[in-house]
């Protein structure tokens, strides 16, 4: 992990992605409007983002944030495969499970930092531009914390799946293709199936990308939907991590 951090911080890709991410946050704060269903808000449409609404609005754009997350996952986990240095690292005595978990843990750390910065920095920016626009009290902190915590579990699941794809594909382009397909195809398939039978709409609770957005409004969701969404995320974390390690243990490394 230390070697990865040294490499990442010395490379240009990290800083380019970081600048684009910060620009994305600023653009959303400056031009965005409150559209998500945020508890305690009277006017939920066409209201400029303030410090109190910015965290929810940024979390509501988590489907876009996932593309930045993908960039960090590729930078962290796919570099050795692209450079052809995986075999050298393993030959030095590093166990495959240890190598996999090191990449995964570092990717999860970046996932947390991206999410945390997105919430806190957007609120700070919006407060400086338009004011806080509400009460910064325990109720506000509780709403943000519940939405952030619920969404973070799903984002961790997406990260675990992304790292799994890296070790499956061992190629940056293929990883990106798998990641995008995993994010987009389930929503299309579920929407198509549910159009014939409304009772099947519950399947959306198993769609990670969709859950990342829906859980922003965790205070408005039914308890059963919350449980299904979080259990789904936990399931993906466990299966992708265990499966990824087992696959890497048996796969050929060139």
Image (spheres, rainbow, N blue to C red):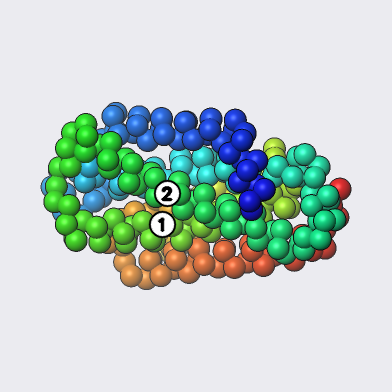
77 left or right, relative to 33: right
**Could you give the CA–CA distance between mark 1 and mark 2, rounded to whole angstroms?**
9 Å
Q: Nearer the viewer, residue 26 or 198?
A: 26
> Callout 1 environment at 10 Å: few (<14), some (14 to 19), or many (20+)?
many
Which comes before the other along the chain, label 1 or label 2? 2
Query: Answer yes or no: do the residues labelled 1 and 2 have beta carbons within 8 Å?
Result: yes
| Camera-side mark, 1 or 2 | 2
Q: Nearer the viewer, residue 203 or 222?
A: 222
Q: Is residue 118 visible?
A: yes
> What x and y, as percent, mark residue 75?
63, 41
Residue at x 65%, y 61% (from the top left corner): 101
Residue at x 14%, y 47% (from the top left corner): 134
> What x and y, as percent, mark residue 150?
39, 61
> What x and y, as percent, mark residue 143?
26, 58
Question: Which mark is drawn over residue 175?
Answer: none
Residue at x 27%, y 42% (from the top left corner): 123
In which quarter of the view is residue 98 placed? Answer: bottom right
* Residue picked out by circle 2: 115
180 left or right, relative to 250: left
> Callout 2 environment at 10 Å: few (<14), some (14 to 19), or many (20+)?
many
Question: Which mark is drawn over residue 151?
Answer: 1
Residue 97 against residue 74 in the figure, above or below: below
> What x and y, as percent, mark residue 62?
42, 45
Circle 2: element type: helix
Circle 1: element type: helix
Q: Is residue 188 visible?
A: no
Residue at x 67%, y 48% (from the top left corner): 3
């Amino acid at each position: 992990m230390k070697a990865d951090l040294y490499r990442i911080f010395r490379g240009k890709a990290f800083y380019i992605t970081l600048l684009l991410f910060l620009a994305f946050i600023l653009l959303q704060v400056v031009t965005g409007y409150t559209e998500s269903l945020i508890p305690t808000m009277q006017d939920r449409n066409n209201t400029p983002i303030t410090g109190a609404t910015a965290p929810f609005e940024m979390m509501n754009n988590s489907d876009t944030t996932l593309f930045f997350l993908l960039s960090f996952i590729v930078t962290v986990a796919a570099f050795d495969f692209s450079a052809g240095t995986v075999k050298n690292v393993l030959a030095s005595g590093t166990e495959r499970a240890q190598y996999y978990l090191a990449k995964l843990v570092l990717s999860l750390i970046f996932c947390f930092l991206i999410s945390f910065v997105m919430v806190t920095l957007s609120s700070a920016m919006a407060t400086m531009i338009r004011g806080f626009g509400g009460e910064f009290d325990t109720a506000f902190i509780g709403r943000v914390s519940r939405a952030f915590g619920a969404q973070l579990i799903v984002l961790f699941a997406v990260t675990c799946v992304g790292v799994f794809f890296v070790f499956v594909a061992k190629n940056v382009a293929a990883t990106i293709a798998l990641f995008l397909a995993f994010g987009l195809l389930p929503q299309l398939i579920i929407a198509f199936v549910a159009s014939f039978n409304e009772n099947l709409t519950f399947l959306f609770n198993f769609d990670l990308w969709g859950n990342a957005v829906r859980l922003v409004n965790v205070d408005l969701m039914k308890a059963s939907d919350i449980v299904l969404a979080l259990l789904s995320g936990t399931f993906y974390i466990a299966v992708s991590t265990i499966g990824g390690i087992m696959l890497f243990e048996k796969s050929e490394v060139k």
